[in-house]
Amino acid sequence: MNVQLTISLLVSDRMETLKKCLDSLKPLLVELDSELIVVFTGKNDETLDFVRRYTSFIIPFDWCNDFAKARNAGLKGAKGEWFLYLDDDEWFEDTREIVQFFKSGEYRQYRSACYVVRNYQDLEGKEYFDTDVGRMCRMTPETEFVFPVHENLVPFEHPNKKMKVFAHHFGYARKKNMIQRDARTGRNLPLLLKMMEENPDSAQCCMQLVQEYRRINECDAAIKYCRKGLELARKEDRIYNYELWMQVNLPLLISHTGDYRLALKEGRQLLRHPRTLEVGILHLCVTLIALCRELKEYREGLKYVRLYHEKLSYLLECPEKASLQRSVEITAAANAVPVYVDGLYLAAEVKDFRMIRQIFSWFPWENEDQVLPQYSRLETWKNKYEDEKNSILMEYARLVTDNTYVGIQKTLYAEKKGNFQEAENLWRLCASDCPPGFQWELIEIAVRNRFSLEPLLAGVSPEAWDDYAETVTERRETEKMQEFCHKIMPLLEAQPFYARRLEQCFLENLLTRELMEPSKLTERLIQYCKSVCTDAALLYREDVLADPDAYPLPVRYRFAVILKEALGLMDDGKLIESFPYLKRSLYVYPKMAGAVGQLLRYLEEKLKNPEQNISEEFIMLGGQVKQVLCGLMDKGQWEEAYGIIGQLLSLLPNDFEVIRMKQKILRKGVCPEGTGQVMPSDRMDDSR
């Protein structure tokens, strides 16, 4: 009877993750002939008691700032044919692939195996990057760990099995907005520098120093050790991962200094070097394309787009080569389409439509998972080159694909050419299977050409329609919005609910943007209240509507109920009595403060001898809006604040504090020119 697998776990006192880690290992211990060795570096008896539930093989280890020694302590006692190691802040999502690997006997065909570690960048688990790690290998007398920091298991030999199983890792996690020197760097740097003194010819140690210096933004030191590491690595017979890593990162590190020309020059040299493998060329091309865009070297950038496609196609056609170089599947899925979109920008700059046609032919249009995340960039690209839009649409029209996004572009092209029957046929196909976010463009096409909206609205939820209605009314000038409503309302006759929602958004924007004479203002407010209350009557029971304060009804309805009461009092000539209702309506829906302010001024003018308390009410009302606005500004909600400041100025046009607040909102809420552009350094981090 043999032990198939030894699992060695380095445990400190991280109880918050230890249970998840051990629980994830339980299937391996239950289903395989395996053992668990715990190398304990902690001091807490509670941790030890918990670990003893899973294994009795516990090795106490006094921490000495040397990970390799700690790992070797576990390795020394291992009895398994294979060895797997991990830390107590990692845990497997699903170990079935590992179980099958051993149960089926497949492990006898390999000498090592890799799986994926998902490294989280925040404690919420929203930001992460995946890395292939070699943490499993066949045990031999030569097997050992080397390097006290970023320890390696050697020898790590081929053939190597690449698994899809992944482990969660929160070791890199840092709370957002926490500004501090990385504690691990403060620990690791002295150790690595000492190692470098003892092993001056270690390329791997250079790579680890690069990582540490990069982490603390000391780019000059990182570049120095990256160059030295590449020089040392090139003296070795084999090409190891650390050499590939330094090849890829050297031009990227130089770009961090702002010297894009030097970064481009270094990247060119690395592409030509005989030790640069295909997967390295892929990553280098991503960086060089971004640099060429920044330096406006568009033709040269297109050369790297072609090279990227050539090398990627080669690796996909030669899986055995790809397996040796590893990570090509991740590269292909994550980088290919973004690189092609970059190529479209470069080609459009030099009006090379033959290249645009070729790049389009490389897109995996039928693979929605890969192309969908790039639709927004494709839209930005198309709209940026307005003068070339017709030619761009013509290239889309040449494509033979069932991709719906391409179908929308073909519809636009048919419309431009005046082929309205073809445009309608294409539109109907797109409406039945529209990608997220593009229903609105199809609506615009339908309104322009009087197509029936029925096929599209069948798949649009009320919530999505609300989003559309708010967006379309906010982006259009009042006159154009009135024209748009005149065209779309007949198309919504069979969908009165959608028509009313659009009407409400239009009226809200009209009432908050425009200054109206009193009778028109009152007419619009009555129209608004009627539309909102009609909707509510269809959606809610009568007893619920009778007591709007007792139920979580929409703010529009509660506002409309209060405003109707105020308008009724005004109609009866009870002007002063309407003030408390107007005040309450503002609390419920501050967005309509502008319309309420206009109404209040109208009331003051109508009263021949307004009493002082009326003016006080009016000033108090403005003060309440100001409090709401200050709260939004304190939270940095500049867009929302901008939506209210105009309404507040209509209440308090002579208040200099409000005028200053408006200027602050405008300065804070508007990005400086150039902000948001993707720099080469950002692009490379994303691509990896």
Image: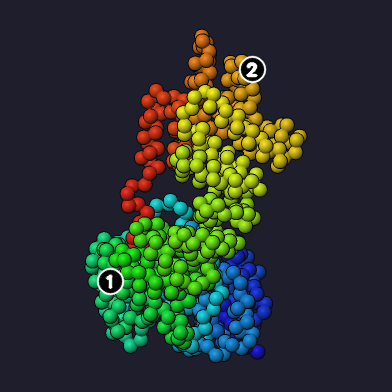
Viewer-side label of 2, 1 = 2
Q: Residues within 10 Å of mark 1 (few under 14, many from 20)?
A: some
* 144 shown above or below 89: below
| Position of the N terminus by quadrant | bottom right
Q: Residue at x 31, y 81 (%)?
A: 233
What secondary structure is marked by label 2? loop
Q: Give the tally of numbered discs.
A: 2
Judge by depth and name the residue closer to the eye, 650 or 606: 606
Identify which amino acid the numbered label 2 is placed on: Asp
Instruction: Tell which circle, 2 or 1, labels the residue nearer the N-terminal end.
Output: 1
Judge by depth and name the residue closer to the eye, 270 or 140: 270
Q: Pointer 2: what residue?
A: 572
* 31 shown above or below 110: above
Taking the image as drawn, is residue 306 in sight? yes
Q: Based on the displayed image, in which of its 4 quarters is residue 19 positioned? A: bottom right
Taking the image as drawn, is residue 427 in sight? no
Answer with left or right where residue 254 lies relative to residue 365.
Answer: left
Where is residue 29 shown, x and y percent of the image? Answer: 64, 77
Q: Pointer 1: what residue?
A: 300
Q: Residue at x 61, y 88 (%)?
A: 105
- Spatial CA distance of label 2 from label 1 is 76 Å
Q: Residue at x 54, y 42 (%)?
A: 486
Residue 415 marker: none
What secondary structure is marked by label 1? helix
| Position of the C terminus by quadrant | bottom left
